[in-house]
Amino acid sequence: MTTSSLTPTRDWWRIPQRYVPVLATLTLLLVMYGVGVSQYRAFSNIQVVFNVFIDNGFLLVVAVGMTFVILTGGIDLSVGSVVAMTAMMSASLLQGGVHPAAVLVVALLVGPTLGFLMGCVIHFFDIQPFIVTLAGMFFARGMCTFISKSSIPITDPFWTSMAQERIGDPKGNFVSISVLVAFAVVLVGAFVLAYTRLGRNVHAIGGNQQSALLMGLPVGQTKIAVYVISGLCSAIGGILLSFYTLSGAPLIAVGMELDVIAAVVIGGTVLTGGSGYVFGTVLGVLVLGVIKTLITFDGSLNSWWTKIVIGGLLFAFILLQRLIGIRKK
Amino acid sequence: MSTSKARWAAVTAHSLFWPAVALVALLVANTIYRPGFLTVEMKDGHLYGSLVDILRLAAPLILVGLGMTLVIATGGIDLSVGSMCAISGAIACLHISQQPDQNALSGVLVALALGIGLSLVLGAWNGALVSIIGIQPIIATLILMVAGRGLAQLITEGQIITINSEPYKSVGVGYLLTLPLAIFIAAGVALLVAAVTRRTALGMIIEAVGGNAEASRLAGIRSARITFLVYVISAVCAGIAGFMVTANVSSADGNAAGLWIELDAILAVVIGGTSLAGGRFSLSGTILGALLIQTLTTTVYAMNISPQTSLLFKAVVVIIVCLVQAPAFRARFARRRPVAPAAPTAADQSKEQVPA
């Protein structure tokens, strides 16, 4: 069965196989944008593209962290809850009159700390990432309601100014500060993954952990590091989300981990680890964003179609990974 | 050989022993906090009391857990059960709401058949993805976990379908012989699954597939067919659980029905001593695990703690249970020679990569 499915892919040899998923995502994104532009006149407005970034900036940041984790062959289910916990914690501290700078520091420390603990349990006690981060997800979500059972508004001047600041050209097109932060995280993430020792270790462990260990690579440190990175990205994502909504709500970002995993997979990262790009993840997030925008523009389709379409795309891309045979045995 | 058997027996006894202790401890704590906790009264010919409530509310979790146990025994995992609950409940409620007489038994039976039928189809989809196409289980079922919620909302058209049907309601809150009907349904399914897996060779075959799918295929077992089968069983169990969840509240909510039940079910299976790497399973352990989780939830409710905060307790339970079961942790804890645990650790790592 595998051999027969591999035969028609011979034509693809001209393009290096590892780029095929990313190129497929890019094509899909362009086709979807093209469909949008041809169907709706307002879609060609450049602000639509900016809005996709504004609405999905926090998703983008979290997805970069998830790319690191999935590249090592792990998974982090706790991201949605950590995002919510960070937003909740910031809102609660700000309400208590703590200085915004202190709040930022605390908020940025909590996520990585949880990630560090989860990474340690995964590495030292050899328990599946799936179940450990599930516990982390329960813990962070429980902490949200422990902090407050209802939504906390944020009225702090620094936060509101960050939320309302518009950076743009005189014609009225603008992006928010969150988008710039998201871009910065993407660039740093891409650089670390492509050009540093840590990035190479991440790819090596995802390729084959035993080999990486035998080569003398610091497997344990790297595995813990990716969960810390994922925790840090979730924390930044949580702060961006609190900029975006100007509140902390205990049930915000429920199920976000699925969106993030879907974005990473659609972006061409192989779920068994070892192969994938941050650039692909950016495309994956954009695909999700454009789907949501298209459904909003259409008006007759309802929001649940988003979930069905994401599920369908997830299926298509996993099948693609399977067909071009880059999935490891 | 006999020593390894004895060791396995000891491990099984151990992994069932601690959940039982935890359950008893929770019940004792409840009784101390609320002296009337253990009393069971007879009212209108029905038994009432906290214990009966725990049994009744644990029924959907037991059902989902049973299916999940078989899936995990083959080394897989089924994340889509929560969405399955929502879909089967939604289609059943939709059919009943369209009937002129919602109390007609025939309409309700057709609704149940529709729900089961749809579960079969979705289970077959999961099974085909895993066994025929060969996608890792966690990803294959993730697709339906995401899309399934959308499907459920598509069926209910984003509304919460409220029904007023006595026969359907009885699935969740009805009584039979003084006890809630849900308990009998869960017990019936449990007995059926236990009989089919433990009285025939099926259970052993499932464990063989979980131990090593390729080796068992070479030994003459149709591994792919077994893998396919367990996902279908899991889907049907989730479908029946969906009827109970929606019947409990007489309405179908595509978003909320069965939310996070997959996590509770996996937790129940793990507490029950079934290894996530596959290869062995314990149905009684899963039932015990489900009862423990429901007791924990009920305790949290009774102590006036927010239901969401109960997740904190669950997180602690998950970590403790996993640590106790982890070979690496036990090795450290028991301070054995470092050489002894090294070999099984390497073997486990290679296996763990299959589901994760």
Image (cartoon, helix red, strand yellow):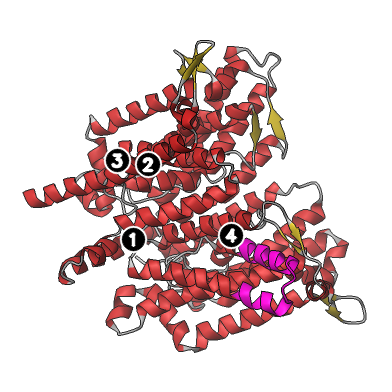
At x 39%, y 66%, the residue is A121
Quarter of the image holding residue B188?
top left
Q: Is residue A66 left or right of residue A123?
A: right
On screen, A259 above or below B73? below
Q: Which residue is mark 1?
A: B352
User: Which chain letter goes with mark 4?
Assistant: A
> How far separated are the C-alphas under marks 1 and 4?
25 Å
Q: Is residue B79 left or right of residue A23?
A: left
Q: Which residues are magenta?
A: A83-108
Mark on residue B282? 3
The three-letter amino acid code for the residue at tag 2 is Ala
> How far separated are the C-alphas under marks 2 and 3?
22 Å
Q: Are marks 1 and 4 on the same chain?
A: no
User: Which chain letter goes with mark 2?
Assistant: B
Q: How many marks?
A: 4
> Considering the numbered disc 2 on the image, is that residue within a helix, a strand or a loop?
helix
At x 92%, y 81%, the residue is A170
Query: Horizontal and vertical percent for residue B91?
Result: 61, 31
Quarter of the image holding residue A183?
bottom right
At x 46%, y 21%, the residue is B40
The three-letter amino acid code for the residue at tag 3 is Ser
User: Which chain letter goes with mark 1?
Assistant: B
> How far separated are the C-alphas under marks 2 and 4?
30 Å
